[in-house]
Image (tube, grey):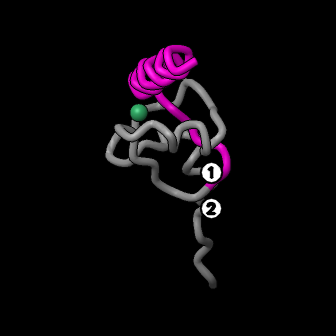
Amino acid sequence: MKRREISLSNEDKEMCSVSGCGKPPKRSLPRKRVEKVGSLTLQGSNRKVHLCSDCYRIFKKETKKDRAMESLGR
Ligand SMILES: [Zn+2]
């Protein structure tokens, strides 16, 4: 009998995509947006990533900063 490999996408659903985190995800976001946040290291290669509430908070904080800088530049 062959052993079935557990699909990565299944695993991805239950865990935060930030490497070393492993908490239950709360939000699903496009990878590109999260990749811009330097303080979050993503694992896997799915186009969508999942963030737990803690990592989402970091993401929001970082993107807010980014947006503020953008508006200052104009
Ligand atoms: Zn997390």
Residue 25 falls within the magenta-colored stretch? no
Location of residue 42 in the rendering, given as x and y in whole percent from the top left corner: 45, 48
* Residue at the disc numbered 1: 10
For numbered disc 2, what is the local secondary structure? Answer: loop
Q: Nearer the viewer, residue 66 or 40?
A: 66
Question: Ligand 1: does it lie within 8 Å of the C-beta at label 1?
Answer: no
- Residue under the point 63% across and 84% down: 1
Instruction: Return the mark for residue 28.
Output: none
**Where on the image, by quarter, is ligand 1?**
top left
Q: Main secondary structure of the magenta part?
A: helix
* Residue at the disc numbered 2: 7
Circle 2/circle 1 CB separation < 8 Å? yes
- Inspect the image, locate mark 1, and give the three-letter code of the amino acid beneath it: Asn
Q: Is residue 15 visible in this depiction of the protein?
A: no
Q: Which residues are magenta?
A: 46-74
Location of residue 35 in the rendering, given as x and y in whole percent from the top left corner: 51, 44
- Residue under the point 60% across and 44% down: 31
Specify few, some or many for label 2: CA neighbours under 10 Å numbering under 14, 14-19, or 20 or more.
Answer: few
